[in-house]
Amino acid sequence: MNRPLVPEDLFRFVVPEDVAISSRGDELYVVEQSIDQEKNTYRRHILAVDRDTLQSRPLTHGPQDSTPRPSPDGRHLAFLRRVDDWQQLFLMSFAGGEPRSLADWDRDAANPVWFPDGQSLLVEVDLEDRELPATREAHAKNEEKRGLKDKYTQDVRYITRIFYRLDTAGYLDHTRHRHLVRLSVDMRRDPEVLTHGAFHHSQAAIHPNGTSVAYQSNRQEDPDMNPYEDLFLLDLQSGQEKQITDGRGSYGAPQFSPDGRWLYFFGHRYTEGFYTQTKLFRVSVNDGTPGRPELIWDPGDHDFGNEAIDDMHAHGAPSLRLGISPDGNRLIALVSSRGSVQPAEWNVAEQRMRWLTEGSRVIYGWASDRSLSRFVLLQADAESPGDVFAAQYDGHRFDMRRVTHYNQELLNELAVARPQHFTFQSQPLGEEMDGWYLLPNGVGPHPLALEVHGGPMTMYAPTFFFEFQMLVSAGIGVVFTNPHGSRGYGEPFCSSIKGAWGQEDFRDVMAGLDRALSTKLFDEKRLAILGGSYGGFMTNWAIGHSERFRAAVTMRSVVDEFSFFGTSDVGYLDEWEWDTTPWQNPQRYLEASPFMSVSKMHTPLLIIHSEEDYRCPISQAEELFAALKRLGREVAFARFPGESHELSRSGKPWHRVKRLELIREWLTGHLLG
């Protein structure tokens, strides 16, 4: 009989994070992530897999290697390796020999892109304008020369911009901007800075003939209050730069068509603020002069990219990648739809979309060869947090076969519950929505934990979720749903809660709970609710507006919209959410704050929060804890030092385990005791 899953099982999971494929499509490159329990850290190395024989060999040994990028000529593999405090660009030859660093800088390199001839690459580096960073050796010597004043005052931050810190990144250095630097493989040419100015440049794409580069940049006078990302085209011979988009939207992930005639890109114009649906555009660049962008693919009731959320993968990994057939008539992208993420193809001539795969799965990474006939994909499903698949595509059939069986031995050992799908109607609109539940072993009715996802612009999918499986192993059923505000259902569904949190979305969450209870599999007197970020907001809101729950866990949550405006890294942009500021209409912010219902909160509550969470600052948790203690309610507060908003997904491994233990103990104590 399989045993229950426990928090420390987290240490044994290996998860593929990223994939690439050789230009000929005959070899796959996989980044494997594992946990070093003794050092309390993650290890990453790159594996090569023969696509036909499935034989594998390690290419690198870490401890922190990522982002494999094979050269177009098949001679080299570029990748990123963390050395000391910085992420450096390394190159290894497939002919043999040790990897070598292309730039030993005191600054991170990011997002390497090959030029078509395979002789040079672009990387993104944070620079003072027109100045390359120092080497690590020079940096160390400069540190030694610091005087006492510099030594003891370098931690003072002088801030002049409203956007001065970012969750997971920390405090921002606005004296530096991200620029594109060209590095030669043979290192005979000095590194060349291609972009200039006090702006960030990122997401580079190189024209097939190597003569121009497209990239994203915000050139607004006040980029903090106007997060409009535009696309630019740089002619490498003349140095002339031309703006492609109109300065009133967010556009990115550019990619040239194989024949060089078109530049494709994703984006939108913020018509519904941060709820706006991303679409695909293209612009003619055939003669080097950008034409007028045209909408080429509207996903309708779906959403581009991977919008699924779980606790086995870092949130926010780029997933807006486009495949373009050699004739330019077929486009392939990941599309999120009703709890699944699958590759879809758009026929440009017929203006028609079709799915290349089906069923319950989340494809969270992929790459293809130049012909768009050979693919490598990363898939998560109900029974696996991630495996590598290869696919062959002839324009009609998309044949997938499994390449890896990560964690199979461990999963065979554990009792893993399969999500059961159900639908329910929103109130009062009557729209059909999706939910799933997980059943513990044994005879019911079982206690039930209602999980609410963050965002709110994300979605749950019926894939392996460690926290859910842990609760089921402890004897507690789990229900999770995609209420209004979720992605994967189109823009009207997502944007319907704009400026109205705690209204239609709260009714949806409770309707999904009632539908699960109608199965008679669960005990309506032993209910809990929990969630993180927006899910934490909804947990706080629910226990302030309902007496149905016997216990609750709120994590990295929003409590007080009024104070959130000035303490979150991007809280000041809530003006887009509520159409006003706290000083113009304080009542609007207070009405949307769970804190204003704190006197009605009687549910025993566990608060979990990270001390370096800049998205939902820990002051949010402190306000709630202090108020509930003052009211004499049952409440506990767990603080995690050195952690960000991403604690549950990519925090220090032992902290992740401790967090899971706290949740399990709190809920079993109140629902099973």
Image (cartoon, rainbow, N blue to C red):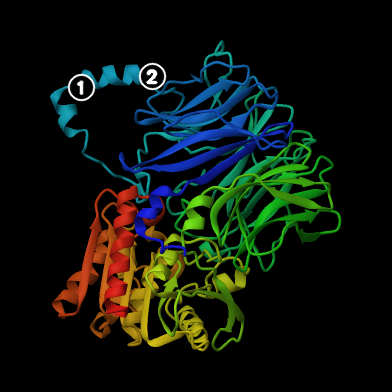
Residue 325 visible at all: yes
In the depicted structure, whether residue 446 falls above or below residue 300: below
In the depicted structure, whether residue 533 falls above or below residue 182: below
Residue 197 visible at all: no
Residue under the image location 37 percent in, 44 percent down: 169
Numbered disc 1: secondary structure? loop
**In whole angstroms, how far apart are the C-alphas of marks 2 and 1?**
17 Å
Q: Residues within 10 Å of mark 1 (few under 14, many from 20)?
A: few
Residue type pointed to by label 2: Thr
- Relative depth, front residue between 195 and 55: 55
Dot placed on the residue nearer the N-terminal end, 2 or 1: 2
- Please tell me whether mark 2 or mark 1 is closer to you in this view: 2
Residue under the image location 35 percent in, 28 percent down: 84
In the depicted structure, whether residue 518 falls above or below residue 283: below
Residue 66 position, x and y percent, is: 50, 35
The dot on residue 135 is 2
The dot on residue 610 is none
Residue 139 position, x and y percent, is: 32, 21
Contact between labelled residues 1 and 2, with CB atoms less than 8 Å apart = no
- Relative depth, front residue between 553 and 61: 61
Numbered disc 2: secondary structure? loop
Quadrant showing the C terminus: bottom left
Residue under the image location 51 percent in, 57 percent down: 412
Residue type pointed to by label 1: Arg
The dot on residue 146 is 1
